[in-house]
Image (cartoon, helix red, strand yellow):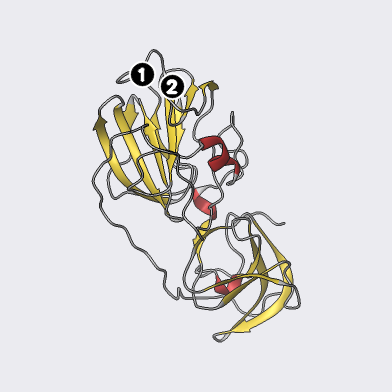
């Protein structure tokens, strides 16, 4: 069992930059995710029927449902565009912590605005049929960066983050209560909650993470704390001692037991 509960935060790395809104393009080759990016654990963007997929003339995926159907952020990040856009009527763009960008179009109502911080599963808009649209639906795109002009395959993008389309919001994705940031440097991610387990990755600095579950494991002692709780981080493929999760509680609130 844990010997001491953390009582202070050791700081997080936070950065957000305002960028100009980009209009959608389809004229150049498809892009891939940034090299070395740590994929977040995703959330379903909206419930509904896939009416159009990703192809040379269509940069994203269309998910159709009733007017005012909720639309959610697929992952943690910062809103970099929220307003009117040619063809979309209204749109929202989110720059995620892994450097990628998601785009949401045709909504009836926007609920987040530029510089707002969101998490996986945050309600950001209500579905509509604004702009060049023949019915109520979400047009969803994924981009490799803020400067990309051609979207990535959204099916593959979401699948890499644990979401298969069509999907149900709240099932198999992150929620605001389970998003955290690590602290410290040279933090080892291990294959299991044991100090003898293989190291699968080493974090060079504070890193935004999605914690799927936590369990008891080997006792870890660091920075005057002792804790046997470990967090499983699917985006990193392993476990991190909760000592290195920047939260005052030794056992993270709102996170299930593995």
**Residue 251: percent from left, percent from top:** 62, 66
Q: Position of residue 216 (x, y in %)?
A: 73, 68
Front position in the image: 150 or 245: 150
On residue 42, the disc is none
In terms of depth relative to the viewer, which is nearer, 171 or 134? 134
Say which residue appears at 56% left-offset and 86% top-offset.
224
Residue occupied by mark 1? 129
Q: Secondary structure at mark 1?
A: loop
Q: How many marks?
A: 2
* Residue 111 visible (yes or no): no
For numbered disc 2, what is the local secondary structure? Answer: strand
| Horizontal and vertical percent position of residue 57 | 42, 25
Residue visible at 74% across and 71% down in the picture: 217
Q: Residue furthest top?
A: 134
In the picture as drawn, the residue positioned furthest to the bottom comes out as 224
Which of the two residues, 191 or 169, is positioned nearer the viewer here?
191
Q: Indicate left or right for 142 with 245 as reference.
A: left
At x 62%, y 42%, the residue is 172
Q: Cβ–Cβ below 8 Å for labels 1 and 2?
A: yes
Left or right position of 193 against 7: right
Question: Which x, y percent locates residue 108?
Answer: 33, 24
Mark 1 and mark 2 lie on one chain; the one further toward the N terminus is 1
Which residue in the structure is indicated by mark 2?
137
Screen quadrant of the C terminus = bottom right
């Amino acid at each position: 069992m844990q010997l001491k509960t953390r009582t202070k935060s050791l700081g997080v790395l936070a950065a957000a930059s305002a960028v100009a809104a980009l209009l959608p393009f389809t004229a150049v080759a498809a892009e891939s995710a940034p090299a070395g990016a740590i994929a977040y654990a995703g959330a379903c963007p909206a419930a509904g029927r896939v009416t159009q997929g990703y192809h040379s003339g269509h940069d994203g995926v269309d998910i159709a449902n009733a007017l005012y159907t909720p639309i959610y952020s697929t992952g943690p990040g910062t809103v970099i565009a929220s307003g009117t856009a040619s063809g979309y009527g209204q749109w929202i763009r989110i720059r995620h912590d892994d450097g990628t960008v998601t785009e949401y179009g045709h909504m009836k109502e926007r609920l987040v605005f530029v510089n707002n911080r969101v998490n996986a599963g945050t309600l950001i808009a209500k579905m509509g049929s604004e702009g060049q649209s023949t019915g109520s639906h979400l047009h969803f795109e994924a981009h490799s960066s803020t400067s990309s002009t051609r979207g990535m395959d959204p099916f593959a993008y979401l699948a890499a983050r644990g979401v298969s389309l069509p999907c149900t919001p709240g099932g198999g994705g992150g929620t605001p209560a389970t998003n955290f940031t690590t602290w410290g440097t040279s933090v080892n991610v291990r294959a299991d909650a044991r100090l003898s387990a293989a190291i699968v990755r080493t974090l060079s600095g504070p890193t935004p993470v999605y914690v799927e579950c936590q369990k008891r494991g080997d006792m870890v002692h660091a920075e005057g704390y002792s804790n046997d709780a470990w967090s499983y981080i699917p985006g990193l493929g392993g476990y991190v001692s909760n000592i290195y999760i920047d939260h005052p509680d030794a056992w993270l609130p709102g996170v299930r037991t593995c």
